[in-house]
Image (cartoon, coloured by chain):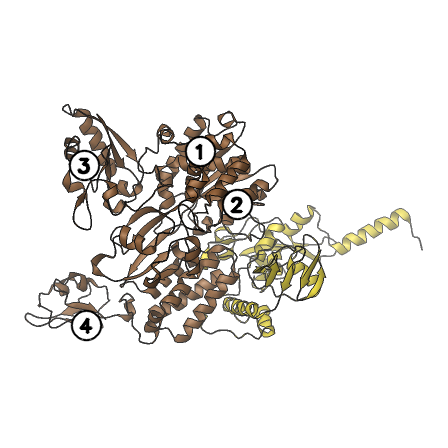
Chain colours: A yellow, B brown
């Protein structure tokens, strides 16, 4: 179907959100909590755009709003700028000096407000880590409490039985604020220590023991390289040398 | 001749001891050999005038007694036949004792639809509800098509009583038109506004009206399963609704083949865990599904994709309580009352600095002035009226100049407040509007689900700023920042809670900006409420050196000697105001 984004005709798929359709066309809409691999959390609100539909004007989150035939979208306007400016200041106060946020502030020429007293840490509570963990089947972390004291943590703040140490949460985090400590022996994340699973053939690290078990179900640990090599040997053995 | 003695056993009256009044009546009547008339004692739901409870009404004489204690029971029984017990009657503004509710200024302007049975019937007895015309609406509905039921509701013009004010008929129609194997009909009984008790009273006092409304709604939209989401703190309401569901099932109003019509529907209660945000429709549905009570974006409406992703209608308790009336008397009758855009009546909980507080039901379109000064009897202690806050914590404050506006959904919204679920809080000159905004923002910052940035973080910083202003540490540019945060929360928040959360700030900034400026520029609180900005002083010429103030000062900040005026030492004073309350000569004032 056809929609109009900033005056440009855009061909969109029926299940597209405005953000998906815009990104495919290379139209920039800021966002921190959107990742196409997970369920959208719609929480950072940076991706707000203005729409016109059936003569009705509205401001919506483009990561959540599904496209409809004839939709008219504006991604930059004075009122959008005002909203984004305040949102960026609020985000900055949550994660001061954070590179992702600072980059967006520079793009929109927003200066932080000193009066917005910063919080400790760098988490902006976007919930991407929680969604990633859920999607991978571990569901070891969650948002806890509500209101201004909300945070992301393991249940009861103790070591989560479900956590497999895959560190996907950290990989998804837009402000890179989940601490992962990797050493020669293993990994520490969410207060839990994990031992590395090492390839029985070459000794390369393939992930934590729990992660490897959860994702392959194999008892024998073998790295992708060695697995490919073994397969090649099997083929060579069966089919013989061709050249 | 037989008489009925109705003893109010709503939560307010129970707290004031109405249970023991009932017991005393039962005891006195069972062993009273010389009683010629046969009275029947009945426990009924809330009468609304809780501050004067326990309330006892004698039928058919329509005599209402207030503040009845067990020791009064004998006298009431003794005077059943002839003249009423004068001292237990309500004293109106002119000092006359009034017998009936029609003469009582609190009740006289009221018109009851949602509360039609509350306070008159025994909520635990389905027969009484039926005798009062109950389940006639359902029977009428089942004899027509769902389409016709929806048309009646549309004709009535009723709009949702829970806050949004969305047309109930249109909501039902959209869900009716959505095709799905399974649909759900929900009732929102998660009343969370501080000071509001409309839904609670209906569920406690007339639970069948809600259940009947739910069944009619289910029939109209084609739902087979319903849930009543009721907050866990409402112990009595939960008990009464549970009983109502069971009794309705026994009578064949719920089940596989309702009244032989072939229509199947059943419902159950889900207890809410006490989060304010779970009153928001999508958060409520998430909570029923067993998920974290967080709202979702509603670009696809619940009537298409709601509970368990199926088409769902969610109606508030009061809305549902109106439905049987509409189906019994017809939509036109209901639509005769109210204003152009808001039909019928609305239940308000009138609280705060007002002479008569309680639960009132009035036709839409009545002015705020009538509500506060006629029904509420004005402001106590000869103080001046300052503002009235409608719509709960996310409502706005309306000043004196707008008191003559009619109360309806659109007018209130236009003036920066909202109907909400119907909380009305009256404030006098001693209420500081900055402190008030701070109070509500604090409530909301704790009760926000915390999912989206503009609401969670906006509220956190608004609370910070308001606290600074109340402590005299504010600067003028704080007001701009407050406005900036408030507007962003209004525009960019995910759900209605966030979108309306800044109303207390925006409306007080709009109507009472002078008070903010007094805190910031003059470092004083005109209402004398913000501790950091006030001081208590003894007026030398009025002080009689009695020493009472010094005796009651918890920190010994007052000293003095006989025949000389006393002094308050400001460096020690904690500004609790105890001295001012205790001074018999009014010699202590706040500045």
- Give residue B48's quadrant in the image: top left
- Dot 4 or dot 3, earlier in sequence: 3
- How far apart in space, not on screen, are marks 4 and 3 (Cα)? 49 Å
The residue to which callout 2 is attached is: B171
Which SS class for mark 1? Answer: helix
Residue A86, x across and y down, in percent: 51, 68
- Residue placed farthest to the right in the image? A243
* Picture layout, residue B240 above or below residue A86: above
Image quarter (top left, top right, bottom left or bottom right) of the N terminus of chain B: top left
Q: Chain of mark 2?
A: B
Q: Residues within 10 Å of mark 3 (few under 14, many from 20)?
A: some
Q: Residue at x 20, y 32 (%)?
A: B24
Find residue B70 and name its label: 3
Which SS class for mark 2? Answer: helix
- How far apart in space, not on screen, are marks 3 and 1 (Cα)? 39 Å
Instruction: Tell which of B353 and B15 is nearer to you.
Output: B353
Q: Chain of mark 3?
A: B
- How far apart in space, not on screen, are marks 2 and 4 (Cα)? 63 Å
| Dot in front, 1 or 4 | 1
Q: Is residue B306 visible?
A: yes
Q: Residues within 10 Å of mark 4 (few under 14, many from 20)?
A: some
- Dot 2 or dot 4, earlier in sequence: 2
The residue to which callout 1 is attached is: B137
- Give residue A128's quadrant in the image: bottom right
Q: Residue at x 44, y 58 (%)?
A: B413
| Dot in front, 4 or 3 | 3
Q: In the picture provided, is B54 more to the left or to the right than B213?
A: left
- Dot 1 or dot 4, earlier in sequence: 1
The residue to which callout 4 is attached is: B569
């Amino acid at each position: 179907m056809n929609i109009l984004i900033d005056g440009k005709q855009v061909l969109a798929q029926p299940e597209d959100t405005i953000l998906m359709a815009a990104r495919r066309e290379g139209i920039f809409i800021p966002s921190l909590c959107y990742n196409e691999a997970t369920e959208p959390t719609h929480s950072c609100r940076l991706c707000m755009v203005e729409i016109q539909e059936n003569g009705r004007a509205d401001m919506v989150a483009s990561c959540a709003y599904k496209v409809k035939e004839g939709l008219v979208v504006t991604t930059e306007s004075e009122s959008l700028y005002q909203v984004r400016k305040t949102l960026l200041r609020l985000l900055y106060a949550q994660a001061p000096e954070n590179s992702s946020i600072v980059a967006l502030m520079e793009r929109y020429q927003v200066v932080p407000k000193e009066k917005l007293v910063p919080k400790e840490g760098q988490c902006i509570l976007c919930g991407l880590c929680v969604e990633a963990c859920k999607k991978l089947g571990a569901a070891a972390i969650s948002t806890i409490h509500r209101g201004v004291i909300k945070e992301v943590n393991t249940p009861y703040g103790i070591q989560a039985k479900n956590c497999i140490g895959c560190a996907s949460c950290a990989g998804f985090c837009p402000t890179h604020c989940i601490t992962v400590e990797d050493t020669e022996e293993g990994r520490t994340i969410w207060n839990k220590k994990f031992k590395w699973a090492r390839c029985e053939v070459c000794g390369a690290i393939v992930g934590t023991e729990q992660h490897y078990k959860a994702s392959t179900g194999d008892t024998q640990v073998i790295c992708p390289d060695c697995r490919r090599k073994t397969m090649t040997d099997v083929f060579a053995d069966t089919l013989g040398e061709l050249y | 001749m037989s008489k009925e003695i109705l003893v109010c056993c709503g939560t307010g009256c129970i707290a004031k001891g109405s249970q023991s009044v009932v017991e005393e009546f039962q005891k006195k009547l069972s062993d009273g050999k010389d009683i010629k008339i046969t009275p029947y004692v009945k426990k009924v739901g809330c009468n609304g005038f809780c501050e004067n409870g326990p309330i006892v009404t004698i039928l058919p004489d329509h005599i209402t007694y207030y503040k009845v204690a067990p020791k009064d029971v004998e006298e009431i029984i003794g005077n059943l036949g002839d003249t009423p017990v004068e001292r237990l009657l309500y004293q109106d503004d002119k000092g006359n004792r009034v017998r009936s509710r029609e003469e009582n200024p609190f009740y006289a302007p009221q018109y009851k639809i949602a509360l039609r049975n509350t306070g008159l019937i025994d909520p635990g007895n389905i027969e009484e509800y039926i005798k009062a015309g109950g389940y006639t609406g359902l029977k009428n509905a089942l004899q027509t098509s769902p389409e016709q039921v929806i048309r009646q509701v549309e004709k009535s013009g009723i709009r949702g009583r829970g806050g949004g004010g969305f047309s109930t008929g249109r909501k039902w129609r959209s869900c009716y038109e959505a095709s799905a194997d399974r649909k759900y009909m929900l009732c929102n009984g998660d009343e969370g506004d501080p000071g509001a008790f409309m839904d609670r009273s209906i569920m406690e006092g007339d639970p069948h009206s809600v259940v009947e409304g739910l069944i009619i709604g289910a029939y109209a939209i084609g739902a087979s399963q319903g849930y009543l989401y009721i907050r866990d703190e409402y112990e009595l309401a939960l008990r009464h609704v549970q009983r109502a569901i069971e009794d309705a099932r026994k009578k064949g109003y719920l089940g596989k083949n309702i009244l032989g019509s072939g229509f199947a529907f059943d419902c159950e209660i889900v207890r809410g865990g006490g989060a304010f945000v779970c009153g928001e429709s999508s958060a409520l549905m998430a909570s029923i599904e067993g998920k974290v009570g967080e709202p979702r974006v509603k670009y696809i409406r619940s009537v298409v994709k709601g509970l368990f992703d199926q088409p769902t209608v969610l109606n508030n308790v009061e809305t549902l309580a109106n439905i049987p009336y509409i189906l019994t008397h017809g939509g036109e009758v209901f639509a005769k009352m109210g204003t152009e855009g808001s039909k019928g009546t609305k239940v308000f909980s009138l609280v705060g600095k007002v002479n008569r507080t309680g639960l009132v039901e009035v036709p839409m379109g009545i002015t705020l002035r009538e509500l506060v000064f006629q029904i509420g009897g004005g402001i106590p202690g000869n103080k001046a009226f300052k503002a009235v806050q409608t719509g709960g914590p996310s409502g706005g404050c309306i000043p004196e100049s707008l008191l003559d506006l009619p109360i309806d959904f659109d007018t209130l919204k236009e003036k920066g407040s909202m109907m909400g679920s119907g909380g009305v809080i009256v404030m006098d000159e001693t209420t500081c509007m900055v402190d008030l905004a701070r109070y509500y923002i604090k409530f909301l910052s704790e009760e926000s689900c915390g999912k989206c940035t503009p609401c969670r973080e906006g509220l956190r910083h608004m609370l910070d700023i308001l606290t600074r202003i109340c402590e005299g540490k504010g600067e003028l540019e704080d007001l701009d920042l407050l406005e900036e945060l408030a507007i962003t929360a209004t525009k960019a928040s995910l759900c209605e809670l966030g979108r309306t959360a800044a109303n207390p700030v925006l409306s007080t900034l709009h109507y009472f900006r002078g008070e903010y400026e007094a805190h910031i520029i003059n470092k004083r609180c005109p209402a004398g409420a913000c501790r950091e900005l006030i001081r208590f002083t003894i007026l030398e010429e009025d002080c009689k050196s009695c020493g009472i103030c010094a005796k009651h000062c918890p920190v010994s900040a007052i000293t003095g000697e006989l025949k000389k005026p006393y002094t308050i030492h400001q460096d020690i004073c904690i500004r609790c105001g105890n001295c001012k309350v205790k001074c018999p000569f009014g010699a202590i004032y706040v500045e």
